[in-house]
Image (cartoon, grey):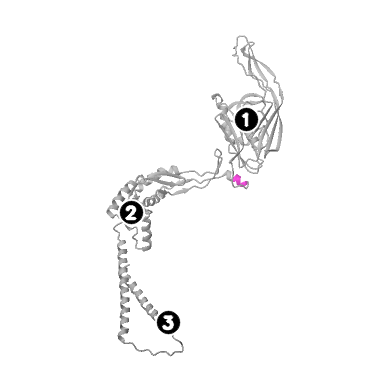
């Protein structure tokens, strides 16, 4: 706004004010006339001398001129003050530059501050974000060079745009400490590209299907893989450095999705989600961690891995033999001791019955329907009678059924001397009790076999005999503290014959005599509640 413009505005105001006062005078005269009676004749007006009317005109003109002069003077003062405030030789009060107050400083001092701040900013932490990967680097590592000249011009231009309203707002922000300019950067594309190429392998991920994290009891959604686009990201780096950003989003390409069997399985059942947040039932059995049992432990891990993560849909049957498959060397199993025909013998996949028994126990306490389960031919040392299950490929199977209206997931682990099984789902509908009572104890027989390696008359127990037992197993399902349903089974564990080798060679070996702990019958009754 100039002084001439202000005078033009003042003149316009004066022109409007003059007629207004004349109108007000006529209004006062009319009011005086209206006070006279209507019947009175209008008095004859006596002409006034010309000298008197001239003085009133002179006074009115003088008043208008005085008002015009005062408006012009005020406008000139305001215009001069505005033009002075628009001078770009100093920064507006309160303006910050890289955290330092530059308000009122001239170009030279601002340039000194900007140069020092630019050098410091080269080593500040800077985040490069590429998809789900974020790495920390510095502007210096990206080949950045500070550009203090640009921010000096920006500081001197701040609040001096020529737009009255915009400048007033900008200056108010500066006074409030809310205007802080950043040092822009230029960069060497070759150094930035080298940094991006080094980051690329960390960003590169494969597309994955829906997965289960059973330790955390979570379902992980499918995700598309990503790949960094280093050359396309150079423009993002240039813009980020020039703007002084603390975080730069890099260009990333998304890989196509992969087949998702779990999602398809759920979709076939009309389900859009899977909940594994609650343990419906759990069971564990111990195993030896001695080096001599390494092959058996290996078989436990192979079998457990085949079960872990298996999803059982509502109403679906679970077959141990179908899920685990044949216990063969081709499937990764080793020779190890196992029970067969009431005796401990080496077989490929020896120990797999412990995995089956652990699975049975977890399913028992989860409330899964027991379709088919056969106990061992002799009591086992790692599990209580009534909670074991034997399997033989492909004649003897463990079959369970999911009776719930929601899917359940099997979680099986082998670690630190424990085979542990869990059945996971969204909610537990019952408490489950296992009850066992001893019905009958049966003696074992002793068999003697000749051994020409031993001295005549020497005896060695090749297999210790075990009494047989008949038991009753009961499962009770409780809801709200009362029995909702009850099942019972009669199970028989045949006696295991004792085999004694007798020497027949007068000069044979004399075996070392060892003592065995006495046999103990199981407790007459047992109860476990989950």
Q: Earlier in the sequence, mark 2 or mark 3?
A: 3
* Closest to the observer, 161 or 459: 161
The residue indicated by pointer 1 is: 353
* Closest to the observer, 140 or 519: 519
- Is 500 above or below relative to 473? above
User: Magenta part mainly helix, strand or loop?
Assistant: helix
Q: Look at the numbered discs 2 and 1 and tell me whether their residues touch, using CB distance below 8 Å.
A: no
The residue indicated by pointer 2 is: 151
The answer to if 320 sits in the magenta stretch is no
Q: Which range of residues does the magenta coloring cover?
A: 264-268
Nearer the observer, disc 2 or disc 3?
A: 3
> SS at mark 2?
helix
> SS at mark 1?
helix
- Identify the residue shown where x is 36% and y is 55%: 175
Question: Residues under labels 2 and 1: Cα distance?
Answer: 76 Å
> SS at mark 3?
helix
Q: Which mark is residue 31?
A: 3
């Amino acid at each position: 706004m100039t002084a001439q413009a202000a005078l033009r505005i003042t003149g316009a105001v004066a022109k409007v004010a003059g007629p207004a006062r004349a109108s007000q005078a006529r209004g006062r005269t009319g009011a005086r006339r209206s006070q006279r009676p209507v019947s009175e004749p209008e008095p004859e007006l006596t002409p006034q001398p010309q000298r008197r009317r001239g003085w009133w005109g002179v006074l009115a003109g003088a008043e208008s001129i005085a008002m015009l002069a005062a408006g012009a003077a005020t406008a000139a003062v305001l215009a001069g003050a505005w033009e002075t405030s628009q001078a770009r030789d100093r920064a507006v009060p309160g303006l910050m530059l890289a955290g330092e107050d530059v308000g009122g400083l001239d170009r030279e001092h601002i340039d000194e501050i900007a140069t020092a701040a630019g050098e410091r900013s080269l080593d500040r932490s800077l985040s490069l974000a590429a998809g789900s990967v974020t790495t920390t680097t510095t502007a210096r590592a990206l080949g950045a060079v500070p550009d203090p000249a640009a921010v000096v011009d920006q500081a001197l231009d701040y609040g001096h745009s020529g737009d009255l309203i915009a400048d007033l707002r900008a200056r108010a922000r500066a006074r409030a400490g809310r205007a802080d300019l950043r040092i822009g950067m230029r960069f060497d594309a070759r150094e930035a590209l080298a940094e991006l190429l080094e980051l690329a392998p960390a960003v590169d991920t494969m597309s994955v299907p829906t997965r289960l994290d059973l330790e955390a009891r979570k379902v992980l959604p499918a995700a598309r893989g990503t790949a960094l686009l280093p050359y396309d990201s150079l423009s993002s780096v240039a813009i980020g450095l020039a703007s002084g950003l603390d975080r730069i989003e890099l260009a990333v390409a998304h890989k196509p999705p992969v087949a998702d069997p779990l999602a398809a399985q759920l979709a076939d059942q009309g389900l859009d989600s899977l909940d594994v947040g609650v343990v419906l039932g759990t069971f564990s059995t111990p195993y030896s961690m001695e080096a001599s049992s390494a092959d058996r432990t290996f078989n436990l891990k192979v079998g457990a891995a085949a079960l872990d993560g298996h999803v059982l849909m509502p109403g679906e049957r679970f077959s141990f033999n179908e899920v685990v498959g044949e216990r063969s060397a081709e499937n990764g199993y080793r020779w190890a001791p196992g029970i067969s025909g009431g005796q401990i013998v080496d077989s490929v996949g020896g120990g797999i019955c412990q995995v089956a028994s652990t699975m049975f126990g977890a399913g028992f306490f989860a409330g899964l329907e027991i379709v088919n389960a056969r106990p061992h031919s002799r009591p086992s040392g790692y599990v209580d009678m009534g909670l074991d299950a034997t399997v033989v490929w492909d004649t003897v199977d463990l079959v369970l059924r999911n009776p719930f209206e929601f899917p359940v997931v099997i979680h099986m682990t082998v670690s630190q001397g424990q085979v542990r099984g869990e059945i996971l789902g969204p909610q537990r509908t019952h408490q489950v009790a296992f009850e066992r009572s001893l019905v009958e104890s049966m003696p074992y027989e002793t068999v003697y076999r000749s051994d020409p390696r031993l001295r005549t008359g020497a005896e060695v127990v090749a297999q210790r005999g075990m009494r047989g037992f008949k038991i009753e197993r009961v499962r009770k399902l409780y809801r709200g503290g009362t029995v909702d349903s009850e099942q019972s089974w009669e199970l028989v564990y045949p006696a295991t014959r004792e085999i004694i080798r007798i020497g027949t060679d007068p000069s044979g070996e004399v075996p070392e005599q060892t003592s065995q702990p006495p046999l103990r019958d199981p407790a007459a009754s047992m109860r476990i509640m989950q």
